[in-house]
Image (tube, grey):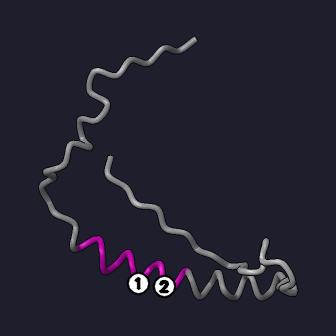
Amino acid sequence: MCYATISLVTDYDVGAGEVPPVSHHEVVRVFQENNERLRTLLFSIIPALPSERDCPCATALEGARLDVT
């Protein structure tokens, strides 16, 4: 399966040292803004995906062994 990761960063102050923390409301606001950006990104990328795959991802697990205990 071909895939890409997308992160919706909402809280830049984590681990940044002497930066004041953000409120829950600020995190939610930024998350909502990021959701709109994510929608825009996905709706522009999905139509650009090729209808035929030419990558080895579809058969990457061919011959793999799965042991369930």
In the rendered image, the vertical position of residue 48 relative to residue 20, given as above or below: above
Local crowd size for mark 2, using a 10 Å CA cut-off: few (<14), some (14–19), many (≥20): few
Q: Tell me which corner region of the image, top left, top right, bottom left or bottom right, holds residue 11.
A: bottom right
In the rendered image, the vertical position of residue 13 relative to residue 54, given as above or below: below
Residue found at the far front of this picture? 17
User: In the rendered image, which residue does mark 2 sit on?
Assistant: 37
In the rendered image, the vertical position of residue 36 relative to residue 4, given as above or below: below
* Residue 50 coordinates in the image, percent (x, y): 16, 63
* Residue 63 coordinates in the image, percent (x, y): 28, 21
Question: Is residue 30 rendered magenta in the image?
Answer: no
The residue located at (19%, 49%) in the rendering is 55
* 64 relative to 23 in the view: left or right: left
- Please name whichever residue, 12 or 62, is drawn nearer the observer in this view of the structure: 12
The residue located at (48%, 85%) in the rendering is 37
* Residue 48 coordinates in the image, percent (x, y): 21, 73
In the rendered image, the vertical position of residue 5 relative to residue 64, given as above or below: below
Which label belongs to residue 40? 1
Would you say the magenta stretch is mainly helix, strand or loop?
A: helix
Q: Which residues are magenta?
A: 35-47
Question: Is residue 43 rendered magenta in the image?
Answer: yes
Q: Tell me which corner region of the image, top left, top right, bottom left or bottom right, holds residue 61.
A: top left
- Please name whichever residue, 12 or 29, is drawn nearer the observer in this view of the structure: 12
Q: Secondary structure at mark 2?
A: helix
Identify the amino acid type marked 1.
Answer: Thr
Residue found at the far top of this picture? 69
* 11 relative to 8 in the view: left or right: right
* Residue 4 coordinates in the image, percent (x, y): 40, 60
- Please name whichever residue, 22 or 44, is drawn nearer the observer in this view of the structure: 22
